Every structure is written in structure tokens, then in C-alpha cells.
Image: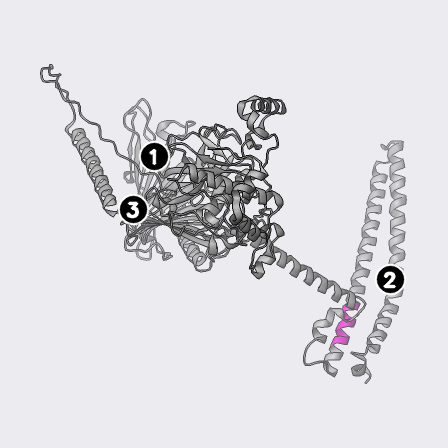
Amino acid sequence: METVVESDQEESAGAGPSLEEDLRETISPPTQKNNDQLRPESYRLNSPNEIHMLKIADSFQRQYSYLFPERKPLLLSPLNECGVKKFVSTTLGLTSTSLPELYTWEGCAGFVADFLSLVPLDPPEDLPRTLSSPTWVLQSQRATSFESASLLCSLLISINYDAYCVSGFAVREMCLLDQSLQDCPLLDAPVQSVILEEQLEHRYALKPRRELRSHFLTQEEKKERDAEAALLQKQKLEESELQRQQPPADPLRGLRRHCWVLVLSGSRGVQEAFFIDPLTGKRYSTGDDNFLGVDSVWDNFNYYVNVQDCSDGCANLVYDLEDLSLWEPVLFGATSKKQLTLEPSQRKESQTRVNNSEDGEKRNPSVFDMPRSWVDDIRISKKDLEDRWPGRQKVTLYRRAKLERFAIYLRRDGLVTRLTTYKDLNWTEELRVKEWFQNRKDHLEEREINKVDGVTSERFKHGRRSHLTRHRFTDIEHELLFGTAQPDDLVRRVVSPSELKEYYEGRADLLYFRHAVFDPRADFREATEDEEWLQKVVERFHRNSSKPADQDVAERVFLLAHNQIEVTYHLDPRRVIPAKRSFVKPRKSTFERKAEEFRRDMATSFQVDPAERPLSTLALYRMMKALREDEEEVVQQVKQSRQNVIDTVTCRQREEENVELSFSPWTTMGAARWSSRRQEMERLAEEEQRWYQERKDDILAPLSKYLDQPEGLDSTKAKELYQQCLSNYRQRLVEKANILQERYDKETQELQRMQQTYQKNQLTLTEQQVEEYQNDCRNKTLQIHVTKERLKMHKVSATERYSALEKKLREDPRLGPYLEG
């Protein structure tokens, strides 16, 4: 195939009148919509370089059709949204973004896949006639696979990836964005069971010795093998069911057009070339079976046609675009991205080598480079990233799963993602619902509802006042997990109608487990003062190495229903049985009988060392008394724990009924709310300042609430305000006089105390101490004199100021008319 170079005569001779008419139409389209007139001139008109590029593309298309008549035409010059022909390479625009989410290919691919909705090709085996600009695609949020790939490729090129748009063929599910037969990426990877095959014994091999094995272990292993075989059989049934549910064969397989993105190695740390599907944002290897063939690739520098065999798909394709035996460029010899990345010396050497070759002798020294992009700067705002999906929400169906995603602050409960798994392939019978939340004031992050077992699990981030991190519950049981900041070092609590279990870590008393047994007829959700609901409490402790093992309590059991206490001590490493003690609590006094006294037969002891002297009755009584005190404390702690569970359950119900969201100032919606709140606060501050300026000289300002009453003033109220104002002012004058008098008395007393100390110790004082004393006396005397003069002046001026206030009140237009009489 001939390479295309710049030759005006050849292109004009081969183009014919039809091409001139087409170009004339692209320069001045016959009809333009009003909204098209608002677009930049580059969208509506073609520059001279673009016109020349279109001529080259048309000539290349004719040569390609002549040399490869069995292949369909290439996508070279589709119409843009204004009806103007544009070369596909010039449709790739550039952008400069400050959003860190778009600094990697994963972020760009995920954004494009989420932000755009698919417009399928019609018919699916033909190339699109139009290719809208990335800016138009971002506005409409609707795009074909070609337009999505153009936007994604533009973003990747802008962040220095060696990316190319790929026009080719793919399977039906990828072209139509059908993921109903794929596993949801949020689901946990299935655990695959592996059954080991038994090796066949040789016919003439010697029989090994009989192996003595436990029948119980043999039965357990047989049960495990049976379970694995059943699981394998279930997987086979599921696979056969999946095969039955698979859609019929695609009659258009290998003909469906699709466009995706190729990322070559060598830039941004990419070690191996890979594909990106713009509809899902997923990464695929270049030999993936979903891609059935490649027609052409292009970037913003050139357009390359694949001349390799694609009968086996894309597995054997080589993506060395500089190899003319594998890829045919539209612009031969034009500057490529690879040349720009080379060092200047290497670039000059490569150019010299090309010029000295046979092709270099034939080529025209004047090489035509790709015109610059006609697309405006691509702008992606933070709000676009937050809203993300068309309509701010998106539903995707997977194999036995449905994934729903919502923009932040779209739902009042803060839900952003919900994954529902189903038992069948028709998405009818729910198995599990998992939800993710953001920006909730109750700090809820995840919730998982098991529809089969009726179990609900909630996970909270750190920040709750109760330090609750997880809450797992059913209709009758609650399991609470806490952070390490609990004051009592509680980490886990499990409550059911019949028992309470608590687990601790790092306690000073070495308690790590508590188990309380309730009367099953009592409901733990109802608070009660009756102690009969508590039947038994078991506490376990870690080993305290500072005590002997037979004195260090390992477990104590309070049998409240039987009025007994049992204590088990830690096991000595040299013994096989731990020491134990059991107590029967004496009966308390009642109206019918007096209290029972402690007897030695109420205590039973088991000592490991028979030579050890038994404890006396007094020591046993003191031990029993301490245990009874501990029992009362433990009962109160169990009551408090049960009440805490009741409060937590009630609080969670109240939080779910009235969900509150916290609006972060780092989001667009949160910033808008904080801005409006700040403006409201500034307005209130300005009103308050204006009110203060208006009334700072008003002597009745403290009584404005009485003056602003709707019913107005009368003679009685006016006199009351008059007397109240005078009384308040008189009280302030008296308080000031008292303060001056207290200060005068304090300074006088300090001076007297200094004089007494001096008189007492004057014979032992040094000259420096005497000088300091004299200076202090002079300062104190001056302070006393100043305070005394201020008190005299205040007493003289108080009467005058009081009279002036009385006169001013009588002359006030609001009170004066009511005080004349």
C-alpha cells in the first residue's frame, strides 16, 4: 500500500469534485442549529491544515479500499456534533486537572465508565457516522463506545500515558455493556474446594503395616470428604445451570464494532501493554478473548491501520507502531510520540537514519504533521466527580448480584453503595444485602443484612461516644464490639435473653471474661430492679505472676440462684489439679427470722498441697465477706451492662428513624452549605453591630424588651421602668463604692502585716531587705492614698450622676409624658 505524503497535485487530482463539495460543506455547513452557533469557531469550521488533513484521509481511504476490498472502510473523518467533518486524531483533546482522582489510569477509566451512559451502535456492525467531541460528551453524559474511548484517551494522554484509541471488534456482552454473567467485583472471591485424588495401589506392592487410627478421626475426615464432594457437585450443578442460562450464540460474532483504549509500555511506569474498556473501566490483557480483532489505532499524532492477521483474535498482534510491515500510518514520516520522548541526540540520529534509507530518498522532504486538536480544553469539575453517574445514581446487574451506586448526599440516609446478592439468576430471591454509607453523624459505614439467617451486622468508624465499632444483632441477640478507648477496657459484649458475655483486654485486675446467666423468662430489653432474674455470674482472670498459683484466682462463680460462691485458683505448673473453694452464703435477716451466722461447714476447700495448713474460720469468714462485697459489685456491673445494651439499642433505633448527615466543607454541596451558613452568620453579626451602634447611647437599651412590646407603654409600666432604671444605676454605684472600699481595706491590711513583720524581724534583717521593705511601704502607701482619693471622688460624683440620670429619664420622650404628674 502506498504511503501518503504531502502532494497537493496528487491529492487534488485524485480527489475529484465529490471531495471538493464535501470539503466546501464542512467549511460552511448549509444548516446550523442555534446552539451550534454558540460553540467555538473550531467546532463549526475547518482550518486550512484540517482541510488538507481531510484530503489526505480521503485519499488514504480510497487506496485502502482498493488494496483491501474485503475489509470495511475505516473511521477517519466522521461528523462532529455540529455536522462538520473532523479527522479522528484531532478529536482527542487535552486537559489540565488539579483533581488527584484523575492522576492515574484507574481514576480516569473509572470516572469515564461511571459518568457516561452507553448509546449502542445502530447497526452494531457499522462504524458510527458521528463522533462528538469530549466536551460535548461530558455535557450530555451519553456516548457510544467510540466517544467514550476518545474521552478516556484524551485524559490519559493529558497525564502522559502512551494511550491510543482502538477501533475493532468485540463480543456482544462487551459491546452492549452486559455484565449479567460476570461476578460482581465487590463480592468476595469464592473459596474453591480441592479434593485430593487417591493414588492407586500397585497390584503387586507390599502391603504396608496396619496404621492404628482413631475411628472418630476417620469418621470426621469422611464427613469432610463428603462435604467437599457435595460442594463440588453443587458447583457443577451451578455451572450447568449457568450454561443453560447462557444466551444463544451471537449471529454477529466477529462483526460487532467496538472501541477501546490501548496503553503501551514505556511511560508512567507501565511495564506491559494492556487494554482498557471505556464502558466498564476494567483492565484487560492484549490477548483477552473478549477482543476479536483490531482495525486501526490512533492518537493525537497519527493514525495507524493494522495489516496483521486477526483470525485468532488479538492474542498474536504486535503493537510496534513504528514497524511498517505491521502497521500502516496515514501520515508517513510525521512526528510521533515516541520521537518526542527521545533525547535530542537520539532523535537527530533516528532522523538521519530515516533520511538515508531508500524510503527517505523517495519521500518528500516537506512532511505534513497532524493538525492541532479542534476541541476546547476538557474541564472536569469536582462536582462531576461527586455526582459521578447520569442522574446521580446507577444500577448494574451481575451474575446473581445487583449493584446500586448513589452520589453523596443524594439519599437522606447517606447510602452510597448497595450490593444485593440473589439465590437465582433472575434476581428474585434475595440472600444478602450489603450497604455502604458516608457522612453520617452516627458514624455508620457499613451494614450487612443476611436475609436467610435474619442477622444484621453494622460497622462504625471511630468517633462514637460509646466507642462502638461493630453491632451484630438478630431479633433476640445483640453482639457489640468496642474500640480500645473504653474506660473499663471492654472489647466485646454479647447479649441474649438468657445470658450476657463480656470480653476485656488490658484490665488492671486481669479480668478478661464475664458470663452472666439470666432467667429466660425475663426480657433483657426491659429494665428491672428485681435481682431474681440473675441466676449465675462467672468471671475469669489472667495469671498474676506476683502471687502464688494457689492464691491467684482464675475463676469465680457467683451462684445467686443457689446462694453459693465458688472460687477456682490458677494451676501450679508442678500440679495437675488447681485449688478450689466453695462458700455457702449465710442467710440475711428478714422480718420473720434473724440473720444466720457464718459457720466453718459453710466453706469447703480443696488444697493441692496436703501439708499446707488449712485456713482458720476467721480467715474463711473474711474471704467470704470480701466475695460477697465483690458479688454485690458484680451484680451492679451486670445491671449497668444490661442497661447499656438497652440504651445502645434504643439509640440505634432513634438514629435510624432520624438520620443526620454531616456536610464536609471539602465537597461542593458541603462547601455551598457552609458558605450559606457563613453568610447568615455574617448577616446576623452585622445586624447585631448595627443594633449596638443605634442603641449604645440609649440609657433605656437594657430595658428594650419592655419598650418593644406590642401593647405599648402606659403610666404604670413607665413608672416601673423609671424606678427599675434608677434602682439598677444606684446598685451599680454602690457596687463600685464597695469594690473601692474592699481594695482600700486590703491594701491597708497588707501594709499593717508588712509593718508587723518588720517590727518582729528588724534586728535580723540585712540592709538590702530593709531597703526593699521601705520601697514596698512607699508603694503600698501610694496605692492606699490613690484608692482613698478615688473613693472620695466617687462618693461626691455619685449623687450628681444619679441626679443627672433622673433628669435625663424625665426628659426622655418615651417616659417623660407618663412621669409629669
State if disc 2 and disc 3 touch (CB < 8 Å): no
Contact flag, marks 2 and 1 (Cβ < 8 Å): no
Q: What residue type is labelled 1?
A: Ser
Q: What element carries label 3?
A: loop
Q: How did the renderer colour the structure?
A: one colour
Tell me where residue 547 sits by quadrant.
top left
Front residue of 117 and 797 = 117
Chain-order first, disc 3 or disc 1 = 3
Q: Name the residue under label 1.
A: 311
Does label 2 or label 1 sit earlier along the sequence? Answer: 1
Query: Sequence-wise, which precedes: disc 3 or disc 2?
Result: 3
Q: Specify the segment rendered in magenta.
A: 721-729
Please check the rendered image and state whether residue 141 is part of the magenta-colored stretch, yes or no: no
| Kind of residue indicated by mark 3 | Pro
User: Badge 2 is on which residue?
Assistant: 794
Q: In this view, does 74 lie to the left or right of 752?
A: left
**Is label 2 or label 1 in front?**
1
Within 10 angstroms of label 3, few (less than 14), some, or many (20 or more) residues?
few
The numbered mark at residue 251 is 3
Percent across and percent down for residue 51 are: 58, 45
Say what secondary structure mark 1 lies in. loop
Q: Is residue 485 among the parts visible in the rendering?
A: no
In the image shown, does 351 or 607 lie closer to the viewer? Answer: 351
Q: Is residue 690 visible?
A: yes
Q: Magenta stretch mostly in which secondary structure?
A: helix
